[in-house]
Image (cartoon, rainbow, N blue to C red):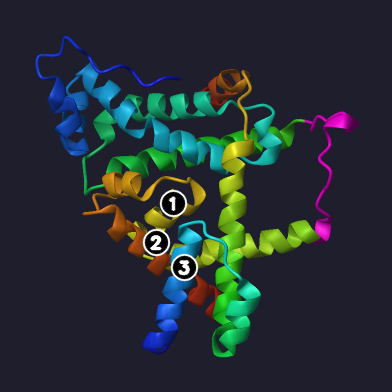
Amino acid sequence: LTPPPADADSPTPDRDETQSTAEILVRAKGGDRLAQDVLVRRYLKILMRQAHGRLPSKARGAYDTEDLVQATFMRAFRNLKRIEPGERGYFLAYLRKILDNLIRDAMRSAARRPEIQPFEDDLPAHQPTPLELAAVHEKLEAYNCAISILPSQQQEVVRLRMELGLSYQEIADVVGSPSANAVRMQVARALARIAEKMANLRGD
Amino acid sequence: MSTEHNEDLIRLAKAISDRKEVDWEKEISTRPELKAVLEKLREVESVTGILGELVDEVRAEPELMKVLAELEEQ
């Protein structure tokens, strides 16, 4: 899965990169195939990172991240007519929801298949014990619970930075923040709030 | 939480976000009143680090489209 190249023959090549996602969605809904390519170029990298970070270990051996993202776009484009361009970030949130659903499907499917055991030579040096896994799981639960209480934009910047590894500037471009530094501050404040909420959750 | 404490928390949160190393033992020992929240901030660093590492670990396999096509038909 590679981003489609910008169309050199397009009469207005710059328009694609300067138009808002809402405007491009309107074009795509009207049957403009080039507009779909623009959407893929705009969101491919983010979705790839999200898919990589979210695919569970059991599903990794049987699923291809690129195809998962491709299926996400295919499903989104099939349902274009139902999409009503909303506020900034709406389409990305919509894509992420589709991707989440596909990942869940992949997990369910993987759970139904017998797990293939690797050869002994392939085993990592340290396999976590059930106790260690339980501790990680507990921390993950607390983190997910705390982050879910934050406003959606704060959740978004934390996930894009901490889970998906985007640069501050990339995040600023995605969420429409005025600067990379503003995003850095947003992420820090959100992380501090998550820690406070986790501390409070423990005290409840 | 006082402004000074909040500044400490934000400073450490920025360090995490910038992926800089934090001496947690030192930070917690010098601010015992923030122990609970700093320990949680350390957990946030750990959890997001695990989630981030998965990005590098996952590798593609060619069977996905077949499985997804099956799921689409269900």
Farthest residue toward the top?
A: A9
Q: Secondary structure beneath disc 2? A: helix
Few, some or many residues within 10 Å of mark 1 (<14, 14–19, 20+): many
* On screen, residue A171 above or below A49: below
Find disc 1 in the rendering and name its residue: A161
User: Is there a contact, CB below 8 Å, between mark 2 and mark 1?
Assistant: yes
**Residue that badge 2 annotates:** A187
Number of residues whose C-alpha sits closer than 10 Å to that of mark 2, classed few (under 14), some (14–19) or many (20 or more): many
**Camera sees residue A99:** yes
Distance (Cα) linking label 1 and label 3: 12 Å
Secondary structure beneath label 1: helix
Q: Earlier in the sequence, mark 2 or mark 1?
A: 1
Circle number at residue A21: none
Which amino acid does the dot numbered 2 rest on? Val
Quarter the C terminus of chain B occupies: top right
Under mark 1, the amino acid is Arg
For residue B13, which numbered disc appears in the image? 3
Apparent side of residue A199 relative to residue B1 in the rendered image (left or right): right
Chain letter of the residue beneath label 1 in the structure image: A
Q: Nearer the viewer, residue A145 or B17?
A: B17
Residue B56 drawn at (x, y percent)? 59, 38
Foreground residue among A113 and A62:
A62
Query: Which of A12 and A62 lies nearest the eye of the viewer?
Result: A12
Which span is picked out in magenta? A114-131
Left or right of B18: which side holds A24? left
